[in-house]
Image (cartoon, grey):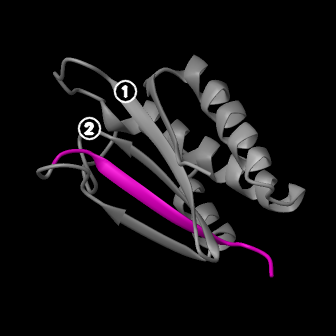
Amino acid sequence: MSGFELRLPAEAAQIPVARRAIAEYCARCGLPAHLVDDVKLVVTEACTNVVLHAYEGELVEEHAFEVSARVEDDAFVVTVSDQGRGLGSPSRNRGLGLGLRLALQLAGGVHTSNALAGRGTRLTMRFALPG
């Protein structure tokens, strides 16, 4: 099965769109229901972080986020990325701080990095596939 890619405006109304789209891709890949639920939850949190924090005070042409996913051997790999302020930049928008902790708890592996040329954030999560 080919990979999944979705690019959406970084707006709160687009978070459920991303959630539904990744859930549909998970189902097409045959992921079990409990894993689909974990992926949906973590993608929702990651997209919410983009909307709340990535573009705060940024003068960039387009505020958007991308969600991509693929099956790799024994793992389902999901990436959420943006071209915003990047990691480590303080935000005025306070959240509960649960998003990354949740990803660390539910995914078997989590990697954060700058998306491109020192800009933006890329969050990649690996979910172990059963048997």
Judging depth in this view, the residue of 104 and 76 nearest the camera is 76
Q: Which residue is mark 2?
A: 83
Q: CA distance from mark 2 to mark 1?
A: 7 Å
Q: Which mark is residue 12?
A: none
The reply to whether residue 126 is in sight is: yes
Front residue (pair 38, 59): 38
Q: Nearer the viewer, residue 31 or 34?
A: 31
107 versus 41 height, above or below: below
Q: Position of residue 36 (x, y in %)?
A: 78, 53
The magenta region covers: 119-131
**Disc 1: which residue:** 64
| Res 94 visible | no
N-term mark: 2 or 1: 1
Q: Name the image quarter holding the C terminus.
A: bottom right
Could you tell me the amino acid type at mark 2? Answer: Gln
Q: Look at the image and say whether residue 130 sits in the magenta stretch.
A: yes
In the rendered image, residue 90, in percent from the top left (x then y), is placed at 28, 48
Q: Picture quarter containing residue 104?
A: bottom right
Residue at the spot 24% in from the left edge and 56% down from the top edge: 114
Point 59% across, 17% down: residue = 13
Against 37, is 24 above or below? above
Q: Residue furthest front?
A: 1
Query: What residue do we see at 13% from left, 52% from top?
Result: 118
Give, as a three-letter code, the residue at label 1. Ala
